[in-house]
Image (tube, grey):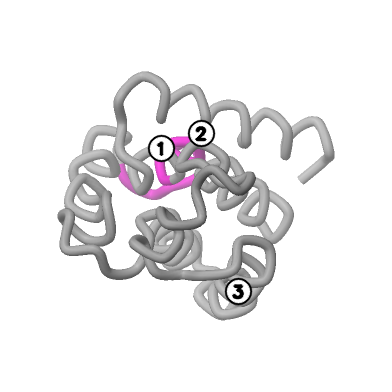
């Protein structure tokens, strides 16, 4: 994707998160036009992955979203590298650990934007 398209995806993910979508939904829906499913189905599919898988404080929903988008776009092989880059940039993949880092330059909205940017750069 072009730098402008990357910025657009990142801004869209932030906007969706600010509108109340969870972290996973925000990233997935920022790529809804590329997915082989309806946006409503994408929102529903990703709805249980926010706050570390339904609030169970496991893998960050942003990371789960990257896996979903890669899989649905036929780019499964890209996911591991994206997850590694996400951890390098943010220090963790686990939701509670990322939440503990908030206030040190991290927010859920920033994580959503990061995941969208990484995906856009890879697709």
The location of residue 44, given as percent across then percent down, is 18, 42
Say left or right for 26 vs 31.
left
Q: Tell me the mark number nearer the camera, choosing from 2 and 3.
A: 2
Q: Tell me the mark number nearer the camera, choosing from 1 and 3.
A: 1
Q: Quadrant of the C terminus?
A: bottom right
* Residue occupied by mark 3: 78
Gap in angstroms between the C-alphas marked 2 and 1: 5 Å
* Quarter of the rendering containing residue 42: top left
The residue under the point 60% across, 48% down is: 104
Say left or right for 105 vs 108.
right
The location of residue 81, given as percent across then percent down, is 64, 77
Which sits in the foreground, 120 or 39?
Answer: 120
Q: Which mark is residue 81?
A: none
Asked if the residue under mark 1 is in contact with the one under mark 2, i.e. CB atoms within 8 Å, the reply is: yes
The residue under the point 50% across, 36% down is: 109
Of callouts 1 and 3, the N-terminal one: 1
Of callouts 2 and 1, the N-terminal one: 2
Provide the secondary structure element on which disc 1 rests: helix
Question: Is 60 drawn above or below residue 116 in the view shown?
Answer: below
The residue under the point 58% across, 41% down is: 113
Asked if the residue under mark 3 is in contact with the one under mark 1, i.e. CB atoms within 8 Å, the reply is: no
The verdict on residue 35 being magenta is: yes
Of callouts 2 and 3, the N-terminal one: 2
The residue under the point 80% across, 30% down is: 4
* Residue occupied by mark 2: 13
Residue range in magenta is 28-37
* Residue occupied by mark 1: 26
The verdict on residue 44 being magenta is: no
Please tell me how crowded label 3 is: few (under 14), some (14-19), or many (20+) other residues with Cα within 10 Å: some
Provide the secondary structure element on which disc 3 rests: helix
């Amino acid at each position: 994707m072009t730098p402008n398209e990357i910025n657009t995806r990142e801004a869209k993910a932030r906007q969706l998160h600010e509108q109340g979508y969870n972290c996973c939904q925000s990233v997935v829906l920022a790529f809804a036009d590329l997915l082989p499913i309806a946006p409503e189905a994408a929102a529903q599919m990703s709805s249980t992955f926010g706050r570390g898988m339904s609030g169970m404080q496991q893998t960050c929903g942003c990371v789960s979203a990257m896996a979903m988008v890669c899989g649905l776009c036929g780019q499964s092989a890209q996911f591991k590298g994206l997850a590694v880059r996400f951890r390098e940039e943010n220090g963790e993949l686990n939701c509670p650990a990322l939440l503990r880092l908030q206030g040190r330059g991290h927010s859920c909205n920033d994580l959503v934007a990061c995941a969208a940017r990484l995906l856009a750069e890879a697709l």
